[in-house]
């Protein structure tokens, strides 16, 4: 890392620490969809346990707990920003500091984009498979080695409407764990493309059924969080998520959070030369428990 002597010390310090002292901001939308998981090695297997057995009257009955695993490997991502020496010399207000304090925002936006692209691609293989070897949204989920081997379906192709939402919501309530017991997850978040916000908001928040003139009660009003939209989704896509559980439908495996790795100066460029700051992070987005999400439409 080459550091030129005439680089003001406050800029060098900002470059190294700006991602840590950025002003607090509301959590990005992806945090309702994906769990932030720290990874400790280059390649790792995320391991979790299946359903807890229910009590029996016989103390001699020993029941196994199923172990689930998923291999993950983080990817490398970089952000490089440049500042001319003339800009440094002419800076009268210290606003150049914001260049560094906003680096984290760029990584946040990238993770947000990856999470919703992955959710949107959950009915294919481009973004990997779920821990059971199936596409994340599929019609025949069954945990390998589970006591309950009946195929379960979290993939629908229904246009967003109150009646179709009811079909999907009911299906989600009937999901079972590997023991065959109902999971009882609380499905509380409707995710869709921005173009479907009006319909989605009526489903999630209107106390009356919006699609008829009878003004009958909408049973889903008050049960749902505010609708979450993402432009990365297909225009017809919508999903129902159990977003308040201890785990989330997706995960962001974070091996290395954004860090300054390069600070160089090129005197041959215009404006008195360029200082280039390079940041590096390592992370990966993947699928968690498919029972926590159900696809209404792709």
Image (cartoon, rainbow, N blue to C red):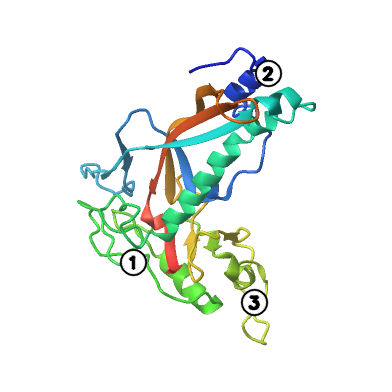
Residue 184, percent from left and from top: 44, 57
Q: Quadrant of residue 205?
A: bottom right
Residue 102, percent from left and from top: 63, 36
Tag of residue 10 = 2
Decide if residue 113 is on the left or right side of residue 51: right
Decide if residue 14 is on the left or right side of residue 159: right
Tag of residue 153 = 1
Tag of residue 217 = 3
Residues packed near mark 3 inside 10 Å, few (<14), some (14 to 19) or many (20 plus): few
Q: Secondary structure at mark 3?
A: loop
Q: CA distance from mark 2 to mark 1?
A: 56 Å
Residue 64, relative to residue 85: is it above or below? below
Residue 245, relative to residue 123: is it above or below? above
Residue 112, percent from left and from top: 52, 48
Circle nearer the N terminus (3, 1): 1
Q: Nearer the viewer, mark 2 or mark 3?
A: 2
């Amino acid at each position: 890392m080459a550091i030129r002597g005439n680089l003001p010390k406050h800029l060098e310090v900002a470059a190294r620490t700006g991602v840590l002292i950025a002003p607090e901001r509301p959590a990005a939308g992806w945090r309702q969809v994906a769990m932030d998981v720290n990874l400790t090695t280059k390649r790792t297997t995320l391991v979790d346990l299946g359903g807890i057995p229910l009590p029996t009257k016989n103390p001699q009955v020993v029941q196994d707990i199923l172990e689930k695993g998923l291999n993950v490997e983080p990817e490398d991502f970089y952000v490089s920003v440049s500042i001319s020496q003339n800009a440094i010399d002419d800076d009268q207000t210290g606003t150049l500091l914001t260049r560094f304090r906003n680096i984290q925002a760029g990584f946040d936006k990238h993770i947000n984009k990856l999470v919703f692209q992955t959710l949107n691609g959950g009915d294919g293989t481009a973004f990997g498979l779920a821990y059971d070897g199936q596409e994340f949204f599929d019609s025949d989920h069954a945990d390998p080695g589970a006591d309950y081997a009946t195929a379960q379906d979290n993939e629908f192709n229904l246009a967003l409407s109150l009646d179709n939402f009811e079909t999907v919501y009911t299906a989600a309530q009937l999901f079972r764990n590997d023991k065959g017991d109902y999971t009882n997850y609380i499905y509380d978040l409707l995710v869709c493309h921005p173009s479907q916000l009006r319909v989605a908001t009526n489903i999630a928040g209107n106390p009356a059924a919006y699609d008829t003139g009878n003004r009958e009660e909408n049973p889903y009003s008050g049960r749902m969080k505010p609708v979450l939209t993402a432009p990365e989704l297909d225009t017809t896509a919508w999903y129902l998520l159990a977003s308040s559980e201890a785990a989330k439908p997706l995960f962001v495996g974070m091996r290395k959070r954004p860090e300054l790795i390069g600070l160089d100066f090129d005197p041959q460029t215009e404006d008195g030369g360029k200082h280039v700051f390079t940041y590096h992070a390592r992370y990966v987005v993947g699928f968690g428990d498919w029972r926590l999400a159900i696809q209404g439409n792709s």
